Image: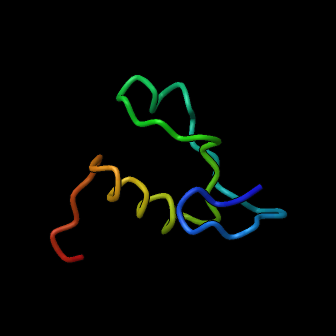
Amino acid sequence: MKCEFCGQEIEEGYLKADLYFFDEYAIDFEQGVFCNKYCFIGELVECGAIQDEYL
């Protein structure tokens, strides 16, 4: 399985988003799998769910 944000292959120790929760807010994750919290937040910034003024 691969991280949805950076594409790194993940073998163990990953973050998994609740697809049903985010689907209600029209955020479409394929698997909802991220290698760490920074990739998860990066994906939320990229899709416009959160804004980071300092990027």
Q: Residue furthest right?
A: 11
Position of the N terminus, as image quadrant, is: bottom right
Which color scheme does this rendered protein use? rainbow
Residue 52 vs residue 6: left or right? Answer: left
Which residue is drawn at the image coordinates 41% and 36% (left, top)?
27
* Quadrant position of residue 22: top left
Q: Residue furthest left?
A: 53
- Would you place residue 48 above or below residue 37 in this image? above
Front residue of 5/36: it is 5
Which residue is drawn at the image coordinates 53% and 25% (left, top)?
20
Front residue of 37/49: it is 49
Picture coordinates of residue 33, whole percent (x, y):
64, 51
Which residue is drawn at the image coordinates 38% and 53% (left, top)?
44
Which residue is drawn at the image coordinates 75% and 67% (left, top)?
9
Q: How many marks?
A: 0
- Would you place residue 19 above or below residue 16 in this image? above
Picture coordinates of residue 40, whole percent (x, y):
49, 58
Position of the C terminus, as image quadrant, is: bottom left
- Would you place residue 29 above or below residue 15 in this image? above
Residue 45 vs residue 12: left or right? Answer: left
Residue 11 vs residue 27: left or right? Answer: right
- Would you place residue 50 above or below residue 12 in this image? above
